[in-house]
Image (tube, rainbow, N blue to C red):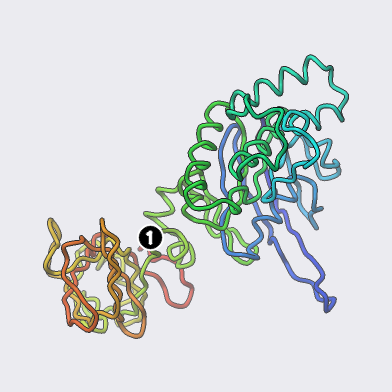
């Protein structure tokens, strides 16, 4: 296996109006040997373009791409020692599973005994031993995706590249395949670069996550770090389900003022916001850090917010309560015993110990440093 490095990699395209646009804007990162890194972001953010540049399917406009100890800028995809798994399974329908698995190795003219050994090892890892003589049409979607994985595994590449491989599967099967991919990574000790638009998938799979937007890397960090310390409003709003709430606020004499409430700030937060006294800020708070006033165990009840409930979603283990604050929709993820119904005027408790504040102009998190 091997590391993957981008050094000031930039990719520009020409659109149909013959105007240039930047898909990836000067990316710098290092994916360590045997690391599982996930690229995540909305459509058009540059994540798939980055993956295709690693594979050699797109040529970067400028910068260097390193795989292992080689700069691969001028190497063809077949010479980069990578294996790619696509969103579509891309299996040959007229071939058996055994033939699909061995196809790449047969093209490379590997010895028959070597091919048989690799097919046997891959099918054992993926639970395909009893399906080798079947055709793809005889398999379920999850089984076909395993075959696509197996075709990559038999190559024994330096780097595995995954381009949204689970997006065609139903929700239950996606969860199952996420578990299997995590286990596969542990067993192979492989370097894996994985692209998805699903932030839940990114959080559950990635050892580190690269969050992208409009061709720019917003933050690279572990799932825990991204969730607890987002660099800016984009990362804060993209990571987490439901996403972080943003509330327009004003800092006044050691207090934070919002529509429906005014709170005294803890000393550490007041110090962090000292440069914003008399100015507007954006308060960011996760839905699970907002409580109904009738069920807020272990949380200080001094930071209260008055609002009218818009909608309540009863999910069994929790309720999602929606209400407006200063023109913004706010979601509270509360205990199922919390009372609430549409139109009810209710007090909510905010756990300010876990909130974040952002500069409304730059959208960067205010750290006070």
In this figure, what is the number of numbered marks? 1
Left or right, 348 with respect to 56, comes to left
Q: Nearer the viewer, residue 127 or 330?
A: 127
Left or right, 366 with respect to 311, comes to right
Can you name the residue that lies furthest to the top here?
113
| Residue 365 sits above or below residue 192 on the image | below
For label 1, count other residues whose C-alpha is less than 10 Å away and answer few (under 14), some (14-19) or many (20+): few
Residue 38 image position (x, y, % from top left): 56, 47
Residue 252 image position (x, y, % from top left): 24, 80
Identify the residue at horizontal 35%, vertical 85% (top origin). 327
Q: From the image, which quarter does the C terminus lie in?
A: bottom left
Q: Nearer the viewer, residue 124 or 279?
A: 124
Identify the residue at horizontal 31%, vertical 79% (top origin). 249
| Residue 160 sits above or below residue 222 on the image | above
Quarter of the figure with residue 269: bottom left
Q: From the image, which quarter does the N terminus lie in?
A: top right
Identify the residue at horizontal 70%, vertical 34% (top origin). 152
Residue 221 image position (x, y, % from top left): 49, 49
Identify the residue at horizontal 56%, vertical 39% (top origin). 36
In terms of secondary structure, where does tag 1 sit? loop
Residue 353 image position (x, y, % from top left): 24, 60
The residue identified by callout 1 is: 369
Quarter of the figure with residue 83: top right
């Amino acid at each position: 296996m091997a590391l993957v490095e981008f050094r000031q990699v930039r990719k520009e395209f020409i659109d149909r109006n013959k105007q240039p646009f930047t898909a990836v804007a000067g990316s710098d990162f290092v994916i360590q040997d045997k690391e599982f890194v996930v690229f995540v972001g909305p459509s058009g953010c540059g994540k798939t373009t980055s993956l295709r540049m690693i594979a050699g399917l797109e040529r970067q406009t400028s910068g260097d791409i390193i795989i292992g100890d080689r700069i691969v800028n001028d190497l063809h995809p077949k010479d980069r020692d990578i294996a790619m798994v696509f969103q579509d399974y891309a299996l040959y329908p007229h071939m058996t599973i055994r033939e699909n698995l061995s196809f790449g190795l047969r093209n490379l003219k590997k010895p028959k005994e070597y091919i048989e050994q690799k097919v046997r090892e891959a099918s054992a890892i993926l639970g395909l031993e009893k399906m080798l003589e079947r055709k793809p049409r005889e398999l379920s979607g999850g089984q076909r995706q395993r075959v696509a994985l197996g075709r990559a595994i038999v190559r024994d590449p330096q780097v595995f590249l995954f381009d949204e491989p689970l997006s065609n599967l139903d929700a239950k099967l996606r969860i199952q395949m996420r578990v299997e991919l995590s286990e596969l990574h542990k067993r192979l000790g492989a370097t894996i670069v994985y692209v998805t638009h699903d932030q839940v998938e990114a959080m559950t799979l990635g050892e580190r996550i690269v969050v992208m937007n409009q061709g720019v890397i917003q933050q690279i960090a572990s799932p825990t770090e991204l969730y607890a310390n987002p660099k800016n409003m984009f990362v804060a709003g993209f990571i987490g389900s439901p996403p972080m709430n943003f509330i327009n606020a004003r800092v006044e004499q050691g207090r934070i003022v919002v529509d429906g409430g005014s709170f005294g700030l803890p000393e550490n937060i007041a110090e962090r916001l000292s440069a914003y006294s008399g100015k507007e800020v954006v308060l960011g708070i996760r839905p699970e850090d907002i409580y109904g006033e009738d069920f807020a165990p272990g949380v200080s009840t001094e930071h209260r917010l008055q609002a009218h409930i818009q909608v309540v979603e009863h999910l069994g283990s929790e309720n999602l309560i929606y209400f407006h604050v200063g023109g913004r929709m706010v979601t509270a993820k509360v205990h199922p015993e919390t009372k609430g119904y549409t139109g009810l005027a209710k007090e909510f408790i905010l756990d300010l110990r876990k909130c974040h504040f952002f500069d409304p102009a730059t959208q960067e998190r205010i750290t006070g440093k």
